Image (tube, helix red, strand yellow):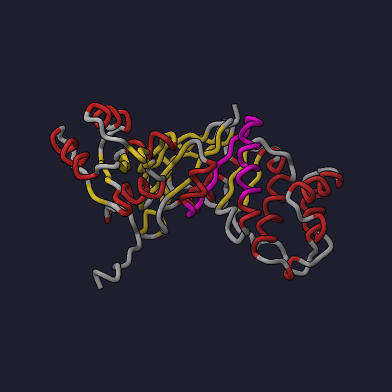
């Protein structure tokens, strides 16, 4: 099985412990989101996995081997860490052809990934003329060039327009369906929730969470029900009698925290109250993430809100 395995991984720069004894696995067949505040250690961890930095202690392996031990790394691992890396004076095609030649890949593979990433029409343009979104697509094309089983992508949606973000989402899901191992770091919580099956969250170099996305949200965000009735005052009294604490919202709606939707409907029906609206408000990944990282020990950088200033 081609998995990424990180065990007791530590990286120290002078007095800074950028990564602090973290252990996790990234499995094939799912997209794993890699989250954490700025300075949490995500990029450092990716660099350690890819052999660009040496760990102070611990190990990071891909398919049981360190990256430096892979015979044909581009055929086994694809990575996007910096969309600005390609030389600006080269064309997109020339950049990919050079990578293909150095890794004994056929030229036809260059044309395939140019089409796959939607930049075949601009392949003859110099990279320095590309927008950030186009550079991102080129970086993804390079990551896909060797048709690898493992992919590590750092902020791949950065600079993409809405159409590009949808394309990226479908690309990641498709790669996972092909039983590839996909690790994606992102600051876009809503977007991460749309594609990530599993989450790994870091804070100040330490592992904060390693769990399925749905479980992560459910564990940190209370359920809430939204209800609107023809007799809101009477419904409020009924809810209070049964131990609930409704809060008035816009349009005459009531919000009830820490309750499932199945508990509210029967109460109203038993009192003959007609409901005009009854819905569960789903917790979001952003809410759960902020709850987890709100601790000062998890965040390297923070700023006061306008109310605190």
182 in the magenta segment = yes
**x and y percent of residue 302 in the render?**
33, 63
Quadrant where the C terminus sits is: bottom left
* x and y percentages locating residue 170 in the rendered image: 64, 42
Which quadrant: the N terminus?
Answer: top right
Residue 171 percent location from the top left of the image = 65, 43
Instruction: Judge whether 135 appears above or below 284 on screen.
Output: below
Q: Is residue 178 above or below residue 182?
A: above
**Residue 197 seen in the figure:** yes
Nearer-the-camera pick, 56 or 29:
29
**Residue pictured at 81% horizontal, 54% vertical:** 120
* Tag count: 0
Name the residue nearer the viewer: 68 or 162: 162
**In which image quadrant can residue 57 be found?**
top left
* Part of the protein shown in magenta: 166-188
Task: Say which of 278 and 136 sits in front.
Answer: 278
> Considering only vertical position in the picture, is 84 above or below 60?
below
* Furthest-left residue in this view: 241
Left or right position of 43 against 90: left
Please give the name of the residue rendered at 84% of the width and 62% of the height, measured from the top-left corner. 124
Residue located 29% across and 50% down the image: 252
Q: Is residue 45 left or right of residue 234?
A: right
């Amino acid at each position: 099985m081609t998995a990424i395995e990180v065990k007791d991984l530590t990286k120290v720069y002078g007095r800074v412990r950028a990564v602090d004894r973290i252990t996790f696995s990234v499995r094939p067949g799912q997209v794993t989101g890699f989250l954490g505040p700025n300075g949490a250690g995500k990029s450092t961890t990716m660099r350690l996995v890819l052999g660009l930095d040496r760990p102070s202690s611990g190990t990071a392996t891909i398919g049981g081997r360190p990256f430096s031990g892979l015979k044909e790394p581009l055929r086994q691992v694809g990575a996007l860490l910096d969309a600005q890396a390609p030389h600006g004076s080269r064309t997109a095609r020339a950049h990919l052809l050079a990578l293909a030649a150095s890794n004994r890949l056929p030229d036809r593979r260059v044309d395939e990934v140019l089409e796959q990433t939607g930049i075949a029409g601009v392949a003859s343009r110099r990279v320095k003329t590309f927008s950030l979104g186009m550079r991102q697509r080129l970086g993804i094309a390079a990551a896909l060039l060797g048709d690898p089983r493992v992919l590590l992508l750092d902020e791949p949606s950065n600079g993409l327009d809405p159409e590009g973000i949808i394309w990226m989402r479908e690309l990641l899901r498709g790669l996972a369906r092909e039983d590839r191992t996909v690790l994606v770091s992102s600051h876009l919580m809503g977007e991460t929730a749309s594609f990530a099956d599993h989450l790994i969250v870091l804070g100040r170099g330490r592992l904060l969470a390693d769990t399925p996305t749905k479980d992560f949200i459910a564990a940190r965000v209370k359920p809430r029900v939204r209800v609107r009735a023809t007799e809101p005052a009477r419904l409020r009294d009924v809810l209070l009698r049964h131990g609930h604490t409704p809060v008035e919202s816009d349009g005459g709606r009531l919000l009830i925290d820490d309750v499932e939707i199945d508990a509210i409907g029967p109460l109203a029906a038993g009192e003959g109250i007609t409901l005009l609206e009854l819905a569960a408000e789903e917790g979001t990944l952003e809410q759960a993430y902020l709850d987890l990282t709100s601790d000062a020990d998890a965040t390297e950088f923070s700023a006061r809100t306008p109310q605190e200033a």
